[in-house]
Amino acid sequence: MNVLITGVTGMVGSHLAEYILAEHPGVAVHGLVRWRSPKDNIRPILNRITLHLGDLRDLSGLINLLNKVKPAKIFHLAAQSYVDQSFAAPVDTLDTNILGTANLLEAMRHAGSDAKIHICSSSEVYGQVRPDEVPITENNVLRPASPYAVSKVGEDMLGLQYFLSYGIKTLRTRMFTHTGPRRGSVFAESTFAEQIAERELGLASGPVKHGNLDSVRTITHVKDAVRAYWKLLEVCPPGEVYNIGGSETLTVGKILDILKSHAKVPITQEVDPTRLRPSDVTLQIPDVSKFQKATGWMPTISMEDTLLDLLNYHRVRLKSLYNT
C-alpha cells in the first residue's frame, strides 16, 4: 500500500513518516516536497521514503503525482501554519492553505482517486469561545480570529464539500495544541524551550521573552498526534470531522513555568510587545469523546514529558549547531 504525505518535511509530517515506517513496515511512504524544502527533519529516513518534487499550487503536477503514486491514503499536512505570519501575509496564507487544498482535492477528482484523505484543519477555527462552550465540541460555532484560522475554515469546509459533492473520501481533524521535537521556534512553547537552551549553553543572556501567558491550552505530544492521524484513516468513515487533543489543561504561563523548572541555569522572563497578536484565542479545551469513541485512541505521553522532550530537542540541536 502507498501513502502520500504532503508537508512530509515538517514536524508532524516527519514524525508521521517515522511512525508508519516503524509500525507498518509493509506501507510505502511517499512525500510531496518543494525543491527548497529543508530536509533536516527527514534526513535519517531519506533512504526509506520516496520524495516527489511539486507544489500544491500546481494542479496538473498534482494530477500526475496521484496517477503515478496511486496512494490508498493521503495525509494533507502541508500548510502555512504560523498564526503571526498570517497577520503579516494574509493573502499568501489563504492562497497556500485554501487554494492548495482545493488543488489537491481537484487533483483527486480528476485522477479518479479512491484514496481516503486526511484534511488537517485546526482548533483555531473555533476562535474565542465562551466559557459556557467549554469543552469545545465539533458542533461549536466557528469564529476564526486570524487569517490562518480563516484559511483552516476554508480547508475544513472544502473537505466537507468535496465529500458531499463528489464522494471524495475526506476526513477532517481539528487538532488542538501538539508539540515535541522539531516544533518550529516561532511557536510559544518551542521558543520558550529554545531561549532556555540558549541561556544554558551561553549563547544568549537576559530574560526569556514571551507574549500573552494567560491563554489556556491542552498539550498533545506529536507522537500521540500521528498515531491519532493513522487511526483516523484506518477506521473512521469518510465525511466526518473530529476534535483531537490532550487531556491535560494549562495556561501558556504554566508551560513556561514547567520549562523553567527543568532549566540548568536561573531563568527570568519579560513580556515582548511584538509577540502580542492583534486578536488572540485564549480558551482551547476540547471535547475529544467523538474521536475516542470512534477509534479508542488515547494520549499516552504526559504533558510534562512532552515539554521536556521539546527542551531536550533544542539542547541537542543548538549544541550540535554551535559545537558547544
Image (cartoon, rainbow, N blue to C red):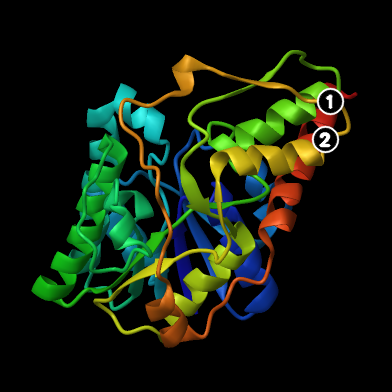
User: Which residue carries the number 1 mark?
Assistant: 266
- Identity, as a three-letter code, of the amino acid under mark 2: Ala
User: Mark 1, residues whose alpha carbon is within 10 Å: few (<14), some, or many (≥20)?
Assistant: few
Q: Is residue 38 visible?
A: no
- In this view of the protein, which residue sits in the foreground, 24 or 207? 207
Q: Is residue 204 visible?
A: yes
Determine whether the residue tagged by mark 2 lies in a helix, strand or loop: loop
Disc 1 to disc 2: CB gap under 8 Å: yes
Taking the spot 61% from the left edge, 81% from the top edge, the residue there is 26
Residue 185 horizontal/vertical position (percent): 59, 33
- In this view of the protein, which residue sits in the foreground, 132 or 20? 132
Q: Is residue 79 above or below residue 131?
A: above
- Identity, as a three-letter code, of the amino acid under mark 1: Pro
The answer to whether residue 316 is left or right of residue 258 is: right
The answer to whether residue 73 is left or right of residue 219 is: left
The image quadrant of residue 81 is: top left
Taking the spot 62% from the left edge, 38% from the top edge, the residue there is 190
The disc label shown at residue 263, or none: 2
Determine whether the residue tagged by mark 1 lies in a helix, strand or loop: loop
